[in-house]
Amino acid sequence: MAQDPTPPLPPERLAALRSIQLTSTPSPAYIVHLDCLEKNCQLLQSVAEHSGAKILLALKGFACHSTFPLINRYLSGTTSSGLHEALLAHELFGKEVHVYSTAYKDTELKHLSRFAHSLVFNSAQQLFRGIELLPSNNRPELGLRVNPEYSEVDTELYDPCAPASRLGTTRDALDRALKQLPQNPLKQLTGLHFHALCEQDADALEHTADAFEAKFGDLIPRLKWLNFGGGHHITRPGYDIERLCRTVQRFRDRYGVDVYLEPGEAVALHTGILAVTVLDLIEAGGHQIAILDTSATCHMPDVLEMPYRPNILDAGSPGDHPHTYRLGGMSCLAGDVIGDYSFREPLQIGQRIAFLDMSHYTMVKNTAFNGVPLPAIGLYSDQSGLQIVRKFGYEDYRNRLS
């Protein structure tokens, strides 16, 4: 079962999301509130201006490209985890396209080299291969992801710097690899990248940056940029923005480098809902159970992976209100359970409810397991109202499997 509820949304965000009329949406449907998204982007732009950092949208967290025309007014570009994300960024976002992958195929490198701003490699061997493969007169800037061997992430599944992590090279591994290669690829290096955070505040970044500097500081003076990765919860209420800016400015001033930040979740945090419908009400094992036309495993997989318990608009934890229900999905997975929630009034078959914070890591990770239909995608703003930009049907499921 999922952990404690996520922190409540600020009152103004709740009011904004409550303005979306659930009876007007398809079900299930992800609805992104563009006004909330723009406020997040404006905050990120102000952080960039104050700190001097360049802020990128991490597509692994949020890739709803119908919102790109809004986001690219405020951010410097995107960061991708492979060819397809990078192509999406290149074709529909514009600006700088940065790419990191745990390993590249030769064909992918050649394709990416035509448009990427930077390619970040996961090991010295991969970096050396990239240098050999790509012509020196027409290739992106080259980076190396490193592991500072420091982490404050509690959930092992999301800890990039866990022991034996495959993400990034440690200093010892780097030094050993350099001795085995015929030439030193670091001479062609433009930047270093580390990513060690997950939904964390600026204190964790500062501590990680100190560990990174202790391990790899001797390599920084020859570089053009540093990338401090993602996991920065910058748009969360109470985040220590001043501390973030001081950390960025310290490296910019000390080494004369550009500093990139690449949040994904923070861009879309508190901007969207998943509108769903109650299909049935049953009783089992002493629990009142509501079956929904959604699924944890299909539509909000982090509920099971993290795990976490998403909030519901106008609902509470068990016992907060008179009527408590266990909410379950419509797949055949026995563990397709979202959590226990209480409501002021009894639920009714056909009733709409809204899961909160359903923009990031939902659309990018959902599946059609069991043939469960994918939620529609909609945009909402106070000025324009609701616009449904994508619906999915049987053909989408069939075409993936042919």
Image (cartoon, rainbow, N blue to C red):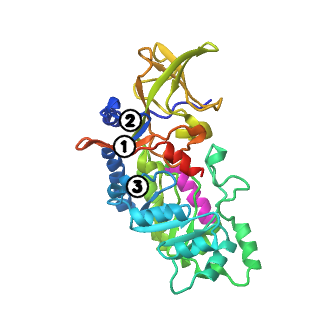
Residue occupying the point 55% across, 61% down? 81
Which numbered disc flags the more N-terminal residue, 2 or 1? Answer: 2
Q: Is residue 287 above or below residue 330?
A: above
Q: Residues within 10 Å of mark 3 (few under 14, many from 20)?
A: some
Question: Mark 2 near mark 1, Cβ–Cβ under 8 Å?
Answer: yes
Q: Secondary structure at mark 2?
A: loop
The Cα–Cα distance between marks 2 and 1, rounded to whole angstroms, is 9 Å
In terms of image quadrants, where is residue 130? bottom right
Q: Is residue 349 above or below residue 392?
A: above
Let me know if residue 149 is in the magenta part: no
At which x and y percent is residue 124? 67, 73
Would you name the residue on which mark 2 appears? 26
Asked if the residue under mark 1 is in contact with the one under mark 3, i.e. CB atoms within 8 Å, the reply is: no
Q: Earlier in the sequence, mark 2 or mark 3?
A: 2
Give the residue pinned by disc 3.
65
Question: Helix, strand, or loop for circle 3?
Answer: helix
Dot 3 or dot 1: first in sequence order is: 3
Locate residue 253: give its quadrant.
bottom left
Q: Which residues are magenta?
A: 202-214
Q: Which residue is mark 1?
A: 378
